[in-house]
């Protein structure tokens, strides 16, 4: 069976993968061949005995920068193994923020190639030459792109058929249809004086659905006014 999705990682720490992606439902899917993960060690494309991939920044300044010539060779090798429709992305705090729509797009493409940067970043020229898409997981800085790549790939893999089980599980999650997810409850009926909302134990499925939708709208309006504005605009 051919994998439904392939993640290709360019990294100087291939031993970091699959990491958390090798656990739980994603790990089972990986073991069962429903998706595939390949790593390319950027150091393999270095030509010196120390396998160095970085150098001092032009113009001076702290830290080191990953070299364009070495990264260029690594990206060329990755492209040779990828399909044309696979996105080529670089994990970067200056990139556009990753969204659920990106997870859907990558899953639909059947694969993605991710460049995991280290040090102060990568030579700008290699990003320009290969038209690399810069993506961020949020407004904070990590020590490297590998943890961010795992977060994003988890969001993609769980969308694959057969990974999560019931497809209905995905339909009402946060960010689907532009809204956050409704609150969840389970037994016991009363916990520390707090009761499950009566409507959820009423057995009236239409009222339950209405309650959940109302809560989704309420939570989105209060917690994510940016999403709420888009949701209201799209309903018009």
Image: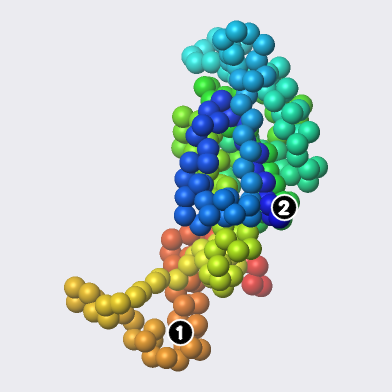
Q: For this rendering, which residue is in front, 135 or 72? A: 72
| Residue 144 visible, this orientation | yes
Residue that badge 2 annotates:
2
Asked if labels 1 and 2 touch by Cβ distance under 8 angstroms, the answer is no
Instruction: Tell me which residue sits at (46%, 37%) in the image.
Output: 140
Instruction: Tell me which residue sits at (53%, 41%) in the image.
Output: 18
**Which secondary structure, mark 2?**
loop
Report x, y in % for residue 96.
Answer: 61, 42
> Where 154 falls versus 182 (above or below)?
above
Q: For this rendering, which residue is in front, 131 or 33? A: 33
Instruction: Tell me which residue sits at (72%, 52%) in the image.
Output: 2
Quadrant the C terminus occupies: bottom right
> Where 56 falls versus 5 (above or below)?
above
The mark closer to the camera, 2 or 1, is 2
Mark 2 nearby-residue class (10 Å; few <14, some 14–19, many ≥20): few
Q: In the visual, does 21 lie left or right of 126?
A: left
> Where 38 falls versus 106 (above or below)?
above
Quadrant the N terminus occupies: bottom right
Instruction: Tell me which residue sits at (53%, 38%) in the image.
Output: 17
Q: For this rendering, which residue is in front, 24 or 74? A: 24
Residue that badge 1 annotates:
208
């Amino acid at each position: 069976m051919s994998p439904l999705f392939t993640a290709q990682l360019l990294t100087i720490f291939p031993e970091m993968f699959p990491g958390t992606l090798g656990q739980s439902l994603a790990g089972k899917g990986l073991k069962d061949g429903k998706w595939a993960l390949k790593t390319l060690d950027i150091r393999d494309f270095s030509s010196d005995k120390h396998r160095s991939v970085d150098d001092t920044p032009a113009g001076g300044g702290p830290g080191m920068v990953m070299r364009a010539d070495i990264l260029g060779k690594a990206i060329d090798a990755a492209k040779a193994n990828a399909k044309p429709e696979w996105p080529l992305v670089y994990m970067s705090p200056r990139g556009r923020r990753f969204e659920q729509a990106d997870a859907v797009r990558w899953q639909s493409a059947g694969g993605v190639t991710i460049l995991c940067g280290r040090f102060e970043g990568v030579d700008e020229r290699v990003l320009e030459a290969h038209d690399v898409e810069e993506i961020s997981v949020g407004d904070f800085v990590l020590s490297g792109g590998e943890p961010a790549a795992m977060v994003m790939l988890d969001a993609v893999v769980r969308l694959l058929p057969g990974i999560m089980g019931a497809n209905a599980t995905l339909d009402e999650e946060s960010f689907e249809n532009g809204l956050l997810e409704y609150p969840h409850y389970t037994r016991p009926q009363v916990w520390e004086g707090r009761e499950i909302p009566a409507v959820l134990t009423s057995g009236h499925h239409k009222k339950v659905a209405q309650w959940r939708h109302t809560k989704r709208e309420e939570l989105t309006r209060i917690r994510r006014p940016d999403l709420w504005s888009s949701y209201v605009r799209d309903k018009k």
